[in-house]
Image (cartoon, grey):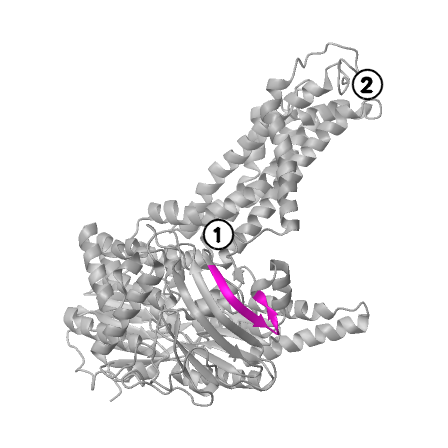
Amino acid sequence: MTVSPPGPRPRRLGAACLDGLALVLLGVPVLLAILGPGLAGSTAPDAAPLLPPGAGHVLGTDVLGRDVLALVLSGGRSVLAMTLAALLTAGAVGLPLGLFAAGTRRRWADETVMRGLDVLLAFPALLLVMTLAASGHQDATTLVVIAAVVQVPAVTRLVRATALAPGCRTAVEAMRMQGAPWHHIQGRYVLRRVGAPLITDAGNRGTMILALLASANFLGLGLPTDAPDWAVLVERNAEALFLQPYAVLVPAVLLTSLAVGGNLTADRLLGRTRRAQIFTGTVPKAGGADPAATDRASATTRSQTARALHPGAALGSGFAPGAVRPDHELAPGPAAEPLLVCRGLTARTSAGATLLHDVSLELGQGRCLALVGPSGSGKTTLGLAVLALTHPGLSLTGSVRLNGTDLLALSPRELRAARAGTVAHLPQDPASVLDPARRVGAVLRELAALHHSRDASPAGSVRRRRRVAAAEDVRRALRSAGLPEDGPLTRRHPHRLSGGQQQRMALATALVTRPRLLVLDEPTSGLDEHTTALLTRSLRDLMSDGTALLLITHDARLAGELADETVVLQDGRVFRRETAGRPPVPAEGAREHSGPCVPPPAPEGASDGVRAHRLTVIGDDPSRPRLSPVDLVFPPGSRTVVTGLSGAGKTTLARALAGLTPATAGRVEHRGTVLAAVAERRDRAALRAVQYVHQDTRASFDEYRSVIDQLTWTARLLRGLTSAEARQEAESLARRLGLAPDSLGRRPAALSGGQLQRAALLRALTAHPALLICDEVTSALDPPVARATVDLLAVESGRTGVAVLFVTHDRPLFDSGAHTWLQVTDGRVEVRAARR
């Protein structure tokens, strides 16, 4: 059985009917407007008024004695031309205003633009038309200008909101750290990001403009009363509706068809855009290269790098070799029918490359199956495939049986029904499942209510019980995710949560529906040790209640504590299986993060490094600052580690140093020069001095450009290197980080989370900064690659003198190589000496 990706999947009959209806409703009036005037005869009065349909006049005549058919054929051009003119004018004005408001460095300018548009938004459009008509300004041009002007505030708001969305904002911040000019960020990247919602909104916006123009013409406030226009025709013949209905009903139906067809077409486009955004994954490399081949090359480079640094390390997995069994010999499951059974599961790209090779596995109720392996080995692809989900351009073969039902044999509607309330998926990027426009608590309550509405009953008492049960499910999900049941966190938007809080809130959204199968992709990335322990206990409790876990992780300790069976993937194949009941143990040299024996002495020359003096960030509550005043020194070649619980203020400190979160007080200096508090106001020298690697590395890349193009930008813009020099340097450093240069020629969606994490680190390193800030840069890496990455940074720090600031929850990885430790607690920073 084969399942195709969402794009080529056969269309359902209902969806095809809606598409056909939208095409007819919009296409008929548009074709009449375009071709009609060439087919229409004279629209001058040439017969008696209000004649019924006859041989000379197919639809009769109107009140002025004009042929109704000729008026219908020629009356659409003015409607369509005026609507398009107003729509394009609104976009031509609103688009640059929205980009300016979102990208301006001056808050007062943003406020001036938006508050001025608010005044215009509050003014009734039809009243403005009536006022101008009463003053004698009654012509097509004036009407078009008014219709466009009243839509400018909505277009501007849409563009500004899209440009300021968290996903877009992270990439914009990364480009600013690279020194990209304002016009490039706004004119190329942000413009492409806002293009899709702007085009989708154009259908609804055009309908509103059409309604305004038609209303003005119908009320006699627009075109002359004898103009061949559908709305004017309706207005002129309204009083003779019963004598000559065709003169009113035909143009009215065409106007309605145009409006409804435009809305329906916009809705269909919006639905397809959402589906495309859900499945953002591997795409074939430009030029027809084999993605699997580059993944294999990348994996080979990684294993070579790991072995060079740790001769005893296993092949890139982080787990010691166990009893290797053939793929068809599965671990014994429970006596009952397993909840999930996969047989011969294979994933291929449209170009014929194989990303998963004949994978078979079983998972019973209350059991945990761990998928481990190096970055790019196919773990995430397999985690989606067991839910019959695929990235664009991939197809699945084999069988995936959930509760005895083959998911790959179901239609899209049947597939949704089979998964609803039964499975839940937590992706590696938690921000992708959190609605940026809504408070997280409201989303949780809505999901719980939807889950309980499936057994709906009209009885009032039952509805009350459902509400109580839904509220209890929300509290239970928050507890299981290690979050307070009722507090300020649930009233925040996702962008106001730390990375660890986002991770746990995304897990809560997966748990709130009480799934029987839970697929977790790196659930502990970005979590501190205490929260990881709480999460482990919660997951163990879920298993005791019968929930099956498919755990995708690089955390050997988590897999050892939860997994009944561990499957190690390598290049999309099952490399080995660990027998049930025997947790994996760290491979020699792969864990517990053995590194340099002792840290070198702390570097001297603090005056040449980066200093922070009384750096402070005040939040919403002045009595509890997000970052209390702190003095820090980062001498050249030093390595500083920042630890603390999730939400304690670690990222706030890092972003304040980089100028991404403006400091309320204090200053950051480099060699005696004070750096601007906001990165946008820092010149290239200041940007080069402090570089920042985002925790959400996938969101920090431009999804429309190849990774290598983005990596070379930093050296070109901040150091003045040529394209060839920057590319050569980037490829050399990529090999040292275990990245195959060929894989960097693809777009970010084609790389795994671990590959992107190292690419983001490479991007910042090519600036040759004085201070490199790394926010959880090893969270998506398998242990050998994480160790190799930290060791490489230590080497670079000693060789080039770059000071490195690590924000991390993985203390053992940095125990032996740090000069200074910073403990952050509720925004207060405590400086500690290096651990010996």
Quick check: 796 left or right of 101? Answer: left
Quick check: 808 left or right of 581? Answer: left
Residue 431 drawn at (x, y percent): 47, 65
Region of the chain picked out in magenta, as a range: 395-407
Front residue of 804/78: it is: 78
Three-letter amino acid code at the position of disc 2:
Pro
Residue 743 drawn at (x, y percent): 31, 60
Q: Residue at x 73, y 26 (%)?
A: 234
Q: Nearer the viewer, mark 1 or mark 2?
A: 2
Which residue matches tag 2? 52
Tag of residue 162 = 1
Three-letter amino acid code at the position of disc 1:
Thr
In three-dimensional space, the C-alpha distance between marks 1 and 2, rounded to whole angstroms, equals 54 Å
Residue 124 visible in this rendered orientation of the protein: no
Residue at far right of view: 242
Hey, which quadrant is residue 320 in on the image?
bottom left
> Mark 1 packing: few (<14 Cα in 10 Å), some, or many (20+)?
many
Vertical comparison of 366 with 402: above or below: below
Hey, which quadrant is residue 478 in on the image?
bottom right
Q: Residue at x 45, y 54 (%)?
A: 164
Q: Main secondary structure of the magenta part?
A: strand
Residue 744 drawn at (x, y percent): 30, 58
